[in-house]
Image (cartoon, grey):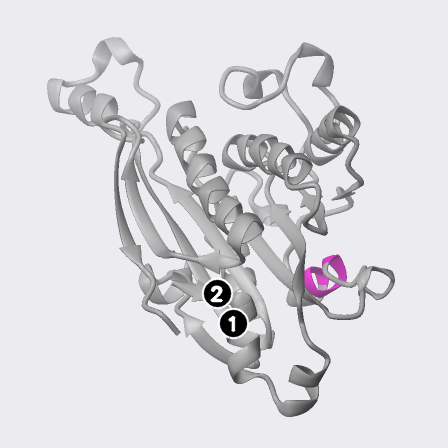
Amino acid sequence: MINLLDYHAKNDDSEVRQSRIQSMYYYIVIIGAGGTGGYAVQRITKMLSAFASVDSFLMIADPDMVEEKNLLRQPFVNQDIGGKKASVLTQRYGRTYGLKIGSYVDKYVESVEQLDQLFSLTDFRHKTGQHIQKVLIGAVDNDFTRNVMHEYFMQTDDLIYIDAGIEGVFLPSGDKPKSEWGEEEITDHMESGYSGQVVVGLRKNGTEILEPLNRIYPIDATDLIAPSHNCGLEPYQPQRMIANEMAAFHISTILNELLSTNTIIVHYANFNARTGSCRPQYVQEV
C-alpha cells in the first residue's frame, strides 16, 4: 500500500515538509467519454459528490459526438444524439450532483502539450497545506493516445496515471454475414470481448514508483494511427458493454481508495467480465 500523505512526509525536502501537507486536492482528467469512459464518469461524479469534504476537480476530454449506434452500449439516450459526449456528461452529472466539471471537446488529445494544458487550471485551487495531486485516467481504444499519455507520464514529476483497456470482440475478416461464419468463428466471437486490465502508474518527485501501462503491457509504438487521421483505416472491433462497465468499476475502486484514504493498494488488475473474476497485483509499501 502507498499512502500519498505519508509519502510526502517521508520523502519531500525539508522546505516542503515544513509547509505541512495535510490534504490532497485531486485534479482528475479523463481521456475518453465513450463506453468505459462514460460509465467511469457516472461512478466518479457520484463519488465526488459523496466525498464532498475532499477537494477535487474533474475534466472530461473527448471531441466525439453521440451517434445512434452508441445508444446500445454507451451511457447515452436518444436526446443526446448530435451532442459532444464530454459536454453531455458534463452537463448531466454536473447538474445532477451540483459539481463544477470541465470539458474539452475541441479536438482529440494527441500531444503532451494538450495534456499539460488540461492540467493547467490549478492556480486558484491551491490552498495552504494542500497538495494538488494530478490523476490522469485513460479510457480510450487506441494506442496512439495511450502512447501520448505514457510520454506525459514520463515527463511529469508528479502524476497518478490510471489506464483501462478491454479486449475487442472477434469478427471474421471480409465482412461475412453471420450465416456464413464457421463454427470456430462463431465460438471465437462468442467467447471474446470479455477480458481487460486496469493499470496504475505513479510518479513522485520525478521518480517512478509504480510502472505505468506501457511497462506492464508494452504498446507497439510502430503501429500507431492518430484518432484524427484514422478515418476507418483500422478495422472496426466492437466492445461488450459488460466489459466497459467492469473496466469502469475497477477505475472507480482505485478512485474510491484515493478519495477515502489517500492510498493506492492495487498496481494492476486483470479481469474477465464474463465470469466476474479479477486477479489483482497488489502494491508493495513504499
Label 1: few (<14), some or many (≥20) within 10 Å? some
Q: Who's the residue at 31% across and 13% down the image? A: 177
Q: Position of residue 130 (x, y in %)?
A: 72, 66
> Magenta stretch?
114-118
108 sits left or right of 268 in the view: right
The image quadrant where one finds the N terminus is bottom left
Above or below, comparing residue 164 to residue 200 in the picture:
above
Q: Amino acid at mark 1?
A: Asp
The image quadrant where one finds the C terminus is bottom left
For disc 2, the marked residue is: 3
Above or below, comparing residue 48 to residue 29 in the picture:
above
Q: Are marks 1 and 2 in contact (CB under 8 Å)?
A: yes
Q: Amino acid at mark 2?
A: Asn
| Relative depth, front residue between 125 and 36 | 125
Tag on residue 6?
Answer: 1
Asked whether residue 32 is in view, the answer is yes
Is residue 116 on the magenta stretch?
Answer: yes
